[in-house]
Amino acid sequence: MASLRFSVTFPALLSLLLLSLWVVEAYTSRKLISNNEQEGQNISHLFKDGEFEDPTMYMFFKISDLKLGTKLPIYFNKNDLRKVPPLLTRQEADLIPFSESNLDFLLNHFSISKDSPQGKAMKETLKRCDFKAIEGEYKFCGTSLESMLDLAKKTIASNADLKVMTTKVMVPDQNRISYALHNYTFAEVPKELDGIKVLGCHRMPYPYVVYYCHGHKSGTKVFEVNLMSDDGIQLVVGPAVCHMDTSMWNADHVAFKVLKIEPRSAPVCHFFPLDNIVWVSK
């Protein structure tokens, strides 16, 4: 199995992010957030006749699926490179306020209308980042690579070795790579990483790159998985996470509907979009 883990240095992380930021829409990652910030969210548009139309919903699965030979439909979406927001240094990001209380100033600063889709997305991102963590959760938003790395160390690593995992698509010929909805089969027995602390970081919609990072102090299992497409051409290697305790989740969380399970009654697992970053530490 190809290892997804390596020791992080800032130049290595910078290269990783610059290569991966363009591959998936930011809204894909937002659907994996699992706390009370989703209260009142209307998700009826995602479903038709009891099934979900939005292909980005094909990221969730049940813990019973984690075995050799299980076949699942999974979607990977390629983003337009021209739509990728700029990546700021910490020095640049620290000069710009980052709070919903500064929304009017920020909209004016970036010349964005309050009622535009971009303006509404900015408000949602700032609200998510300002929202207090629920019991047993840790969270932060990184507005630069340096700040994200420092906060990840402070949150889960202390003096331990901090490593990063990402999802990668591997094909013999890059011209044959496909980010459409495909059936994938677990090509190897998923490898559980025992005793791991984990932070999942999801890229958020904002005028520059912002990552929303969150994790749980207990009750999360991390796996390395190898998935092979039905045509045998495309191998996907990456992390998968299972949230074993969903009792504190919003009862209307989309994952319960996608998996057709009673809200808060069972573990929820998911893969990570291609532009997400998973920090792990012993």
Image: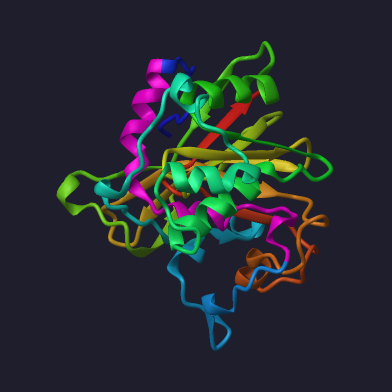
State the residue in front, 51 or 139: 139
Image position of 22 with respect to 152: above or below: below
State the residue in front, 149 or 8: 149
Residue range in magenta is 11-39
State the residue in front, 218 or 79: 79
Say whether residue 155 is visible.
yes
Point 50% across, 20% down: residue: 146
Considering every residue shown, the one lying at the far bottom of the view is 49
The image shows residue 256 at horizontal and vertical percentages of: 68, 68
Image position of 281 with respect to 114: above or below: above
> Is-magenta flag for residue 145?
no
Q: How many marks?
A: 0
249 horizontally vs 224: left or right: right
The image shows residue 36 at horizontal and vertical percentages of: 75, 56
> Is-magenta flag for residue 21?
yes
The image shows residue 42 at horizontal and vertical percentages of: 63, 73
Q: Quadrant of the C terminus?
A: top right
Point 48% across, 48% down: residue: 107
- Magenta stretch, main secondary structure, is helix
193 horizontally vs 108: left or right: right
Point 65% across, 14% down: residue: 160
Point 26% across, 46% down: residue: 81
82 horizontally vs 21: left or right: left
Say whether residue 203 is visible.
no
State the residue in front, 200 or 167: 200
Q: In which quarter of the image is residue 30?
A: bottom right
Q: Quadrant of the N terminus?
A: top left
The image shows residue 117 at horizontal and vertical percentages of: 45, 62
Q: Quadrant of residue 201?
A: top right
